[in-house]
Image (spheres, rainbow, N blue to C red):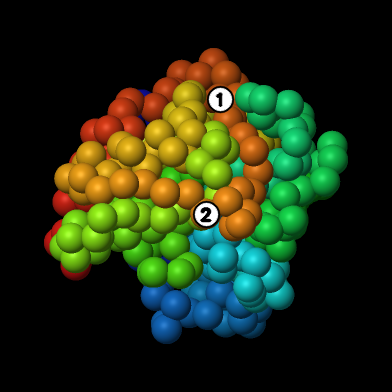
Amino acid sequence: MNGLDTNHQYYIAGHRGMVGSALSRALAKEGCDRLLTATSSELDLRDQKATAEFVATHKPDVMLIAAAKVGGIHANNTYPADFLYDNLMIASNLIQAAYENGVGRVLFLGSSCIYPKFAPQPIREESLLTSALEPTNEAYAIAKIAGLKLCEYYRRQHGCLFHSAMPCNLYGLGDNYHPENSHVIPALIRRFHEAKLAGAPSVTMWGSGTPRREFLFADDLAEACLHLLTLTDPPSLVNVGAGSDVTISELAELVARTVEYEGEILNDTSKPDGTPRKLMDSSLIASLGWKATTALEDGLRVAYEDFLRGA
């Protein structure tokens, strides 16, 4: 990959998560072997003093912020204070420490939930802060908006090369398969797998199944991040999406086929749907020379194989 400095030290905050591990794989693949990492038990990123001392000691050349407290609708709805506080602290502490210690470049990773609930589709970067957020994940979104704005304003005020990328819904290797706190794809993989083993005649899904969602394989996001790191003047904010979406019902059918579950799929319409549609406009990053390469069907097979290894 032209332009990626293999001599730099890359600090991956959140390296054990799905995105962080994908970044580690992508950097290693490109010959970047000076990877700086710390587990949450080694470094609590919510602790300003500890975070500042860590960055001051190691002085990485590049900081990739993939660390976050994450979860699906249920988790976001149940623990909004935790989601807001933890993610605010992680972003603020890392970005400030990067500035104070002369980190040459910061790439902050957010989420498509930063955009308004009823943003025009597909969602352009300019839609940010134009109307109300989706209430079920407002806390997480506010923290991510604060992080990307910190990067934007440090760049404007201090000339730091701090910038942000906002991916659509992600899935892939090392996903979280918690029965209550996981996102939709790992939740469906687990439920269909367990239903297959139990011989259950049906699986009931939350909501109507009509909302449309866009899903990006985490390793594709990692490739997009590395591409952004090669740019001398990257956009302050750029969407990273797969370029197409599916309904939740279509997704459920795809996952059921992948898992080889043959029962009936039912809908519990008393449960919330969340945002009716979230498709990112990824024309900006496409114009900069990147596009996703992993088809949803192929990515789901890889994800299910990964789930089976950990099951």
Residue 141 screen position, x and y as percent: 69, 54
Residue 174 on image: x %, y %: 30, 59
Q: Residue at x 51, y 19 (%)?
A: 286
Residue appearing at x 61%, y 57% in the figure: 270
Inspect this view and state whether residue 136 appears: yes
Give the answer, above or below, for where 186 lies relative to 77.
Answer: above
Query: What residue would you read off at disc 2?
Result: 268
Q: Residue at x 56, y 25 (%)?
A: 282
Question: Crowding near pointer 1: few (<14 within 10 Å), some, many (20+)?
Answer: many
Q: Amino acid at mark 2?
A: Asp
SS at badge 2: strand
Q: Position of residue 264 (x, y in %)?
A: 31, 46
Q: Secondary structure at mark 1?
A: loop
User: Which is in the foreground here, disc 1 or disc 2?
Assistant: 2
Q: Quadrant of the C terminus?
A: bottom left
Which residue does the numbered mark 1 point to in the structure image? 282
Q: Residues within 10 Å of mark 2 (few under 14, many from 20)?
A: few
Q: Judge left or right: residue 93 versus residue 224.
A: right
Check the image and report above or below for 187 versus 111: below
Q: Which mark is residue 299?
A: none
Q: Position of residue 195 (x, y in %)?
A: 25, 60
